[in-house]
Amino acid sequence: MKEILQENLSKDYSIYNIDNAFWNHQNFNIYSATIPDRMHHLDLGLFKHQIEFTCTLLKNQMGKSILQILDKRLAQIPRVYNLHIFKYGISNISQFTASNYRDMMKIFVFVLDRLIDSNLKLNETISSVFVKWNIMYLWTKHDELSDTDLIIFEKDIHEWANEFKSLFIKYSTSNLKLPKFYSWIYHIISSIKEFGSVNGMTSETYEALHKIYIKRLYNLTNKRDIDKQLLTMTRRQEILYASLQQKKIIQFEHLNFIINKTPWYSLKLYDINYIISQLEFDKLIPQETIQGFEYLQICIEDFLSNIKKDSLNLNIQIEVFKNAKLKSEVIIRASPSYYKAPYYSNIAIKIDNEEQQIYINDNGYCYAKILLIIRLMFYDSQNILQKYELALVNWYNFKYPDTLAKLYITIAHM
């Protein structure tokens, strides 16, 4: 192109006569100048292609009905803190953000599990691509990578790329001639060696700041003296944020567990059977809530025995709540209807060393579903009011659910 312009042949080649600044730099390396950006390369790029190619493959192999089943599975994923719920499936995939795609990475492997019962081999192949993607993607989260890590990372990239290409090449209109695909395979490792981990090579932080401090505020202006208005709103926003942070520090300084002031139920131990009969009559109440009340008295007595209290000598007041907020500001729920759907939070609980032999634990943590969130109140022998804020949970990984059914559902300290 440079020679064409120098010889005044631009009209013959329909080229504008504009000097290119990069021609003054003979050793310019475009791959070093434009290193792969994780958000655009992976989240909004290759993973989006992978989802679209998968949908095309499923539609060609099984018909449109398989995509409806896929959407239903996505909508049925239980609510989890900080996880987007795809209640409309992937029909609005064109509106997905990078955050949506990252949430999709967390759940799509499970959505695909045994989706195609008539062709389990194909199902396993598709699932394998997404598993290998997740393994590869986790490497991009590391702040530092050793030479050994880079070797493993490169191996994982090629394993994913080989399966991706063999499975989806015929569903791509360009036969997978995607610049991001080959740039990722052949240039990411050299970029990491020269510039550091991929975790530091993302424009997501700057785009988020641009959205918070420019785009949103710009839409609030009257489009006159824009700079002045933006600066004023940004200043007010920062003052408000700082004051809220101070209030939060004071609010949570002495509290580990915050519960709503108004309980869902307030009862005595002898009221439990009556409440169970009411709940069973209500067809809108999920089984989790009924099961929680069925085990409530047994679990309370077990808890009181652990703290050396006798329920016969105590006037116990029980309050049941639908949600609670932890010190970390994470909201946990045990609600039969939250936005017209049941919501029972899944949690990880730190187990005492002496109890770890009872549970299948993950480095001291066990996993459970919350059935009820309760507050126990009673006066001790010295007439001092005692309060315990607890969760009645159903363990996922108790070792002996058949022989120790009473302990399969227990009360856990928050």
Image: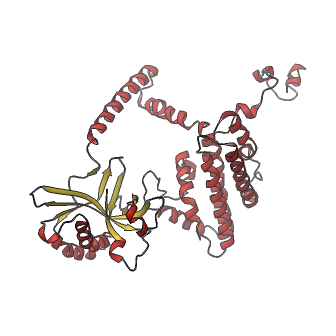
The answer to whether residue 342 is above or below residue 200 is below
Is any atom of residue 48 visible in this view? no
Relative image position of residue 171 (x, y in whole percent): 73, 58
Q: Could you tell whether 219 is left or right of 39 in the image?
A: left
Q: Residue furthest bottom?
A: 403
Number of disc labels: 0
Res. 270 image quadrant? bottom left
Residue 128 appears in the figure = yes
Left or right: 66 in relation to 268: right
Q: Position of residue 313 (x, y in %)?
A: 12, 69
Instruction: Give left or right: position of 201 versus 389.
Output: right
The colour scheme applied to this rendered structure is secondary structure
Quarter of the view holding residue 126: bottom right
Residue drawn at point x = 27 percent, y = 74 percent = 294
Tell whether 363 sits left or right of 371: right
Q: Give the vertical position of 17 relative to 197 (above or below).
A: above
User: Where residue 315 sits: x, y (%)?
Assistant: 12, 66
Residue 26 location in percent, x, y? 82, 23
Please state, as top left, top right, bottom left or bottom right, where the C terminus lies in the image: bottom left
276 and 327: which one is in front? 327
User: Residue farthest to the front?
Assistant: 354
Residue that extends furthest to the right in the rendered view of this protein:
7
Q: Quadrant of the N terminus?
A: top right
Nearest the viewer among 277 and 376 is 376
Q: Is residue 33 above or below residue 377?
A: above
Residue found at the very far left of the displayed protein = 383
Q: Residue at x 39, y 59 (%)?
A: 349
Is residue 330 placed above or below 74 in the rendered structure?
A: above
